[in-house]
Image: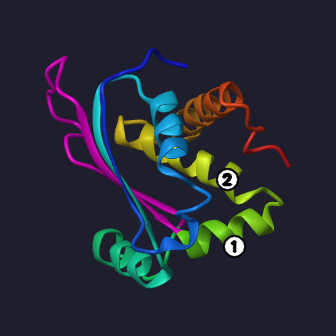
Amino acid sequence: MSAKNKLSLSVQYPDARLQESITRPKVRRWVQAALFAPAELTIRFVGAEEGRILNRDYRAKDYATNVLTFAYNEGEDIAEDEPTRADIILCTDVLEKEALEQKKTVEEHSAHLIVHGVLHAQGYDHDDDEEAAEMEQLERDILAALGYPDPYAT
């Protein structure tokens, strides 16, 4: 999708269930594919309790969600060489449940959620139909380039 941009990446597994299957090299590949600019990112895999607490404390929604993106320099006047900075939190419990319900592999769904979170970190959103269509098409294109199926196909 994009030329390789400078990336500082931390991958954390406080919930270690996916550490062997969703490896740091895979995560790096997915993140890099969705980057349009340099970035400093943390990807963190958490259990339901931490996911619920973060969603409750920062979004006022008292349940665990699949992915949360905390973009730290979103909306600022960022110098051209200033990296995107964000934490992207994936809730393993929700991710695994959704993959099963959607008849996807955990790897496919993880790749999609990470691409989705990285796009959010860079200012993409889905608050209205036009933004959602643009973001979803980017996700489809990036995931296809990575060899994964359309995450929105039914």
Magenta extent = 66-91
* Corner quadrant of residue 120: top left
As rendered, which of 81 and 120 lies closer to the eye? Answer: 81
Q: Residue at x 49, y 76 (%)?
A: 64
**As drawn, is 111 to the left or to the right of 50?**
right
Q: Is 80 left or right of 111, judged from the image as shown?
A: left
Where's residue 62, x and y in %? Answer: 43, 82
Amino acid under label 2?
Glu
According to the picture, the residue beneath numbered tag 2 turns out to be: 107
Say how the picture is coloured: rainbow
Indicate yes or no whether the magenta region holds residue 71: yes
Q: Which residue is mark 1?
A: 97
Closer to the camera in the image, 141 or 25? 25
Task: Please tell me which residue is depicted at 19% across the width and 17% down the height of the picture.
Answer: 80
Q: Quadrant of the N terminus?
A: top right
Separation (CA) of disc 2 from disc 1: 13 Å
Q: Nearer the viewer, residue 95 or 153?
A: 95
Q: Secondary structure at mark 1?
A: helix
Up the image or down, 78 lies above or below 120; here it is above
For discs 2 and 1, the disc positioned in front in the rendered view = 2
**Residue projecting furthest to the front:** 20
Query: Compared with residue 117, is residue 106 higher up or lower down, i.e. above or below?
Result: below
List x then y, in percent, for residue 83.
Answer: 22, 30
**Residue at horizontal 72%, vertical 44%?**
151
Mark 1, Cα crowd under 10 Å, few <14 / some 14-19 / many 20+, is few
SS category of the residue bearing label 2: helix
